[in-house]
Structures are given as structure tokens and as C-alpha cells.
Amino acid sequence: CELTRAKEQLELVRSQLHTLRGENDELRLKYSNLERTAKTTGAQLLEERCKSDELSKQVKAMSQNMMSVMGQQEASATAKEATGLQKRCFKLVQQNTALTVQSRLLRRQKGWAEAKAHVLQDEVTRIYP
């Protein structure tokens, strides 16, 4: 009788150990996925920073070019026309920059959402095979 109880307990402990090992493997896999995602995200953020710096340089160059053009325009047109053209050009540059930044942000968010959906799908598949 005591031997039977010991065997049952041993089987129970083995079953629990097997379950815990499976959970440990899943957590290790999730951790490695999250670690890889964090590295990718960091690299993407660094890339976005470089692109933002490049955009800033382009805007500065465009601004200087625009000022040069406006200097030439002022010589041949009235100051009011030159100021209006200058404001319009500046607004267009601002809109272009804002749209570019928004587009990149949306692409990055889309990638993160797809990755999260994939993880959640894996969870559902694991729970409801």
C-alpha cells in the first residue's frame, strides 16, 4: 500500500516536472524572441534617428537654397510677393517632413503590431491546439 502511494507520488512529480520543463522551454523561447525583437527595435530606432538627422540636413540645405532664390526674387519682384512665396515654400517643406516622419512611424508601428499578432496567434495555437 505504501509502495503504491510512493509510485503514484513519483508519477505525479514526474508529470509536474515534465509540465514545468515544457513551460520553461516556452518561456526561454519567448525570452529569446523578445530579446531579438528588442535588438531589432533598437536598430530601427537608430536608423530612424539617422534618417531624421538626414532630413534635418536636407531641410537646412533647402532653406538656404530658398533664401538664395528669395534674395534673387526680391531684386526683381516686390517684397510682398517674395515673402508670400517664401512662406509657401517653407510650409511645403514642413508638410513634406511631417508626412515622411509619419509614414516611417506608421510602418514601424505596423511591424510591431504584426509581430505582436504573431506572438498572440502562437499563444492561442498553443492553448487551443
Image (cartoon, rainbow, N blue to C red):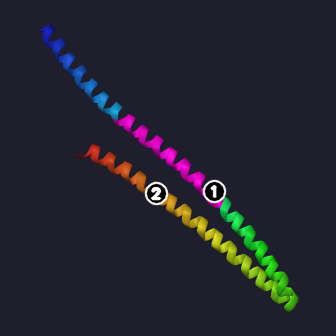
- Tell me if mark 1 has few (under 14), some (14-19) or many (20+) residues whose alpha carbon lies within 10 angstroms of its own: few
For the point 46% across and 43% down, the residue is 36
Q: Is 85 rendered above or below residue 90?
A: below
Q: Is 119 rendered above or below residue 108?
A: above
Q: Write the start and end of the magenta stretch as one range.
A: 26-52
Instruction: Estimate the x, y position of residue 106 in percent, counting from the top left.
Output: 52, 63
Query: Residue 19: which quarter of the image?
Result: top left
Give the SS element for disc 1: helix
Question: Which numbered disc covers residue 111?
Answer: 2
Q: Main SS type for the magenta part?
A: helix
- In this view, the residue in front, 121 or 71, is 71
Please name the amino acid that badge 1 sits on.
Cys
Is the residue under label 1 in contact with that under label 2 (CB below 8 Å)?
no
* Among numbered discs 2 and 1, the one appearing first in the sequence: 1
Residue that carries the numbered disc 1 in the rendered image: 50
> Is residue 17 rendered magenta in the image?
no
